[in-house]
């Protein structure tokens, strides 16, 4: 397995990766929280990550929500506020250029912050849902966005149709991923030539299985991350560094 380091904006990449940076290559990308880290959105499992302060079992599953909806709702409202106050970074921007450069390009994200779309990515498969929508746990009706925007912290977030509890449209532990989005993600991973896994610890399944599926089906798999992850030793090439540095540096290697 090849391992390359990024120092400043100069980057060494393998001849194999270089040969794949042409428009005809079919590319799929999986992003995780690390991609938004440099925008100021905390990751989950890093030293200053969300799970250092909050326990996932108390916040990111349906049981926790039903036990204490107010606590869970406030936690998500706090995170929505962070996301409203930040901007996409150079890594998000570089992925927009990728989408325009490669003829076949699929962006799968585990992120719920909407920053890829705000950067300009047109087709984003959000496998863990989004912070920016909510829906009723009983009737499943989505809540109008202006209702959420005007909600005060002390208000109880309830469905305007049936009065049921509103929940964030994210995928909690033990819940299925959205079916069609997940099918499209698997199809892209299984049919690409080049797969990038970027800013994810690859600890949460089934999303973490996508780079492995791509590898099994013959793609060249590249990881962009400042740290080793659970799948680093199983893939083809590691580009060690923050995505807001590595991705813009990769743009310089694209060949028409
Ligand atoms: C940088 C950087 C920089 C830092 N630049 N990089 C198979 C095996 C074992 C368990 C399971 C399995 N299949 C299913 C499971 C159970 C479970 C699971 O995976 N558990 C594991 C934790 C053990 N999975 C599920 O429950 C899933 N559902 C499911 O499988 O349904 C079927 C089923 C039904 C019924 C019963 C059982 C199964 C659902 C998973 C949903 C995950 N949801 C969350 C919360 C979303 C809502 C919210 O935001 O609150 O999604 S958990 C959290 O982790 C969030 C993330 O999307 C996800 C992944 O985290 P991510 O993005 O990788 O972040 P970090 O923090 O982990 O990593 C950041 C990385 O960035 C690090 O590597 C840094 O180094 C790097 N980095 N700065 C680039 N500048």
Image: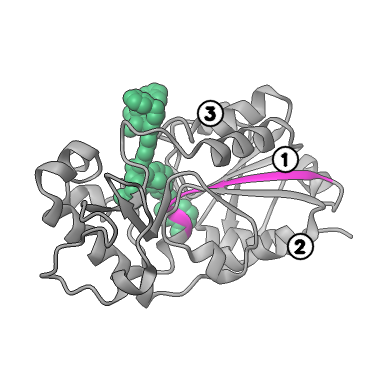
Farthest residue to the right: give it: 256
Instruction: State the separation of the CA atoms marked 2 and 1.
Output: 16 Å
**Does ligand 1 reach within 8 Å of label 1's beta carbon?**
no
Label 1 – label 3 distance at C-alpha: 17 Å
Question: Mark 1 — residue?
Answer: 194
Instruction: Give percent across and percent down for residue 80.
Output: 31, 66
Q: Nearer the viewer, residue 7 or 252?
A: 252
Residue 57 relative to residue 5: left or right: left
Q: Quadrant of ligand 1?
A: top left
Q: Do tag 1 and tag 3 residues touch (Cβ < 8 Å)?
A: no
Q: Is residue 202 visible?
A: yes
Left or right of 118 in this view: 130: left
CA distance separating discs 2 and 3: 31 Å
Residue at point 62%, 59% (across, down): 247
| 178 over 88 or under it: above or below | above
Q: Which residues are magenta?
A: 25-35
Disc 2: residue Cβ within 8 A of ligand 1's nearest atom: no
Residue 233: mark in rendering: 3
Residue at figure coordinates x 58%, y 33% from the top left: 211
């Amino acid at each position: 397995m090849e391992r390359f380091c990024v120092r400043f904006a100069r980057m060494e990449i393998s001849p194999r990766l270089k040969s794949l940076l042409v428009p005809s290559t079919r590319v799929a990308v999986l992003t995780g929280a690390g991609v938004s880290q440099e925008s100021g959105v905390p990751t989950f499992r890093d030293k200053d990550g969300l799970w250092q302060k909050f326990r996932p079992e108390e916040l990111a599953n349906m049981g926790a929500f039903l036990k204490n909806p107010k606590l869970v709702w406030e936690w998500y409202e706090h995170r929505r506020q962070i996301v409203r106050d930040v901007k996409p970074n150079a890594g998000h921007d570089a992925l927009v250029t990728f989408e325009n450069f490669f003829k076949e390009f699929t962006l799968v994200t585990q992120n719920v912050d909407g920053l890829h779309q705000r950067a300009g990515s047109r087709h984003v498969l959000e496998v863990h849902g989004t912070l920016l929508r909510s829906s009723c746990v009983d009737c499943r009706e989505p809540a109008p966005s202006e209702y959420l925007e005007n909600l005060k912290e002390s208000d109880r977030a309830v469905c305007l149709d049936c009065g049921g509890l509103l929940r964030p449209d994210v995928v909690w532990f033990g819940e299925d991923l959205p079916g069609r989005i997940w099918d499209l993600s698997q199809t892209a991973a299984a049919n690409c030539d080049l797969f990038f896994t970027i800013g994810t610890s690859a600890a949460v399944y089934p999303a973490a299985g996508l780079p492995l599926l791509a590898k099994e089906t013959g793609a060249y798999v590249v990881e962009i991350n400042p740290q080793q992850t659970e799948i680093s030793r199983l893939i083809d090439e590691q580009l060690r560094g923050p995505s807001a540095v590595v991705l813009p540096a990769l743009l310089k290697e694209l060949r028409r």
